[in-house]
Image (cartoon, rainbow, N blue to C red):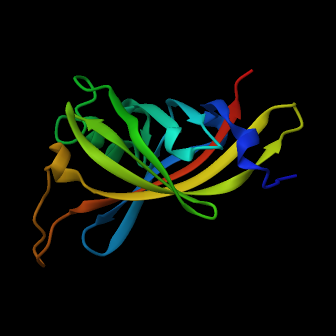
């Protein structure tokens, strides 16, 4: 059963549960459709401060070779030096620098996103989905989040012009997060 408890009872350290979390993205392809993907291998931690959300923190480490768009050929291209160059830059990281309550179940976390050795600020809007004890006795919290980036700001500039105008891959990338985290004992 999901409940909305007194947030102060949620204060503590949590580990992101990769089996119940999605770190995903959407890119416009050929100016006409969206391609969705996700990362399958990542670790993350949260420190929640239910009394003072501004003292909450988050960190994620994402293995870039775990990218999955449902197309092995496309995934191979994304892993190449045209895009993520996973041989040289195997990990993408996020480290929070600021957290704030926006009222109700809405929060915003800002931090440093590092891709290809370039670090830039990223702001993620989050909605608290609730807290629950699962059948195995784990105390869980859930959040959904979204953000947008311009991939060119991190050096992801490969593209191809289309005969009809426009480009093959959009600069704007939509990020989405569906996070389940387990409280540490």
Image location (x, y in percent) of residue 62: 42, 32
Image location (x, y in percent) of residue 68: 44, 43
Q: Is 54 above or below relative to 61?
A: below
Using the image as rendered, state which of residue 141 and residue 104 is in the foreground: 104
In which quadrant of the rendered image does the C terminus lie?
Answer: top right
Q: Quick check: can you spot residue 76?
A: no
Instruction: Tell whether 41 sits left or right of 134.
Output: left
Residue 67 figure quarter: top left
What residue is drawn where x is 56% and y is 46%?
Answer: 53
Residue 79 figure quarter: top left
Using the image as rendered, state which of residue 67 and residue 4 is in the foreground: 4
| Farthest-out residue, bottom | 164
Q: Is 161 above or below relative to 121?
A: below
What residue is drawn where x is 15% and y is 66%?
Answer: 167
What residue is drawn where x is 73% and y is 53%?
Answer: 130
Residue 111 figure quarter: top left
| Farthest-out residue, front | 51
Count how many numbered circles sit on residues in the image.
0
Image location (x, y in percent) of residue 30: 25, 68
What residue is drawn where x is 28% and y is 29%?
Answer: 86
Instruction: Tell whether 131 sits left or right of 134.
Output: left
Q: Quick check: can you spot residue 84?
A: yes
Image location (x, y in percent) of residue 143: 61, 51
Instruction: Tell whether 42 sits left or right of 167.
Output: right
């Amino acid at each position: 059963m999901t409940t909305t408890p007194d947030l102060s009872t949620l204060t503590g350290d949590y580990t992101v549960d990769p089996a119940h979390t999605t770190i995903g993205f959407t890119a416009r392809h050929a100016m006409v459709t969206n391609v969705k993907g996700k990362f399958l291998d990542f670790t993350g931690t949260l420190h929640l401060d239910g009394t003072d959300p501004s003292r909450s923190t988050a960190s994620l480490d994402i293995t870039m070779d775990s990218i999955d768009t449902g197309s092995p050929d496309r995934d191979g291209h994304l892993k190449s030096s045209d895009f993520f160059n996973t041989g040289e830059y195997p990990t993408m990281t996020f480290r929070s620098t600021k957290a704030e309550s926006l009222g109700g179940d809405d929060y915003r976390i800002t931090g440093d996103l590092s891709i290809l050795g370039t670090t830039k600020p990223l702001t993620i809007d989050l909605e608290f989905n609730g807290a629950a004890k699962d059948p195995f006795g784990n105390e869980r919290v859930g959040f959904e989040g979204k953000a947008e980036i311009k991939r060119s700001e991190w050096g992801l500039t490969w593209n191809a012009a289309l005969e009809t105008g426009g480009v093959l891959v959009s600069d704007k990338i939509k990020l989405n997060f569906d996070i389940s985290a387990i409280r540490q004992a």
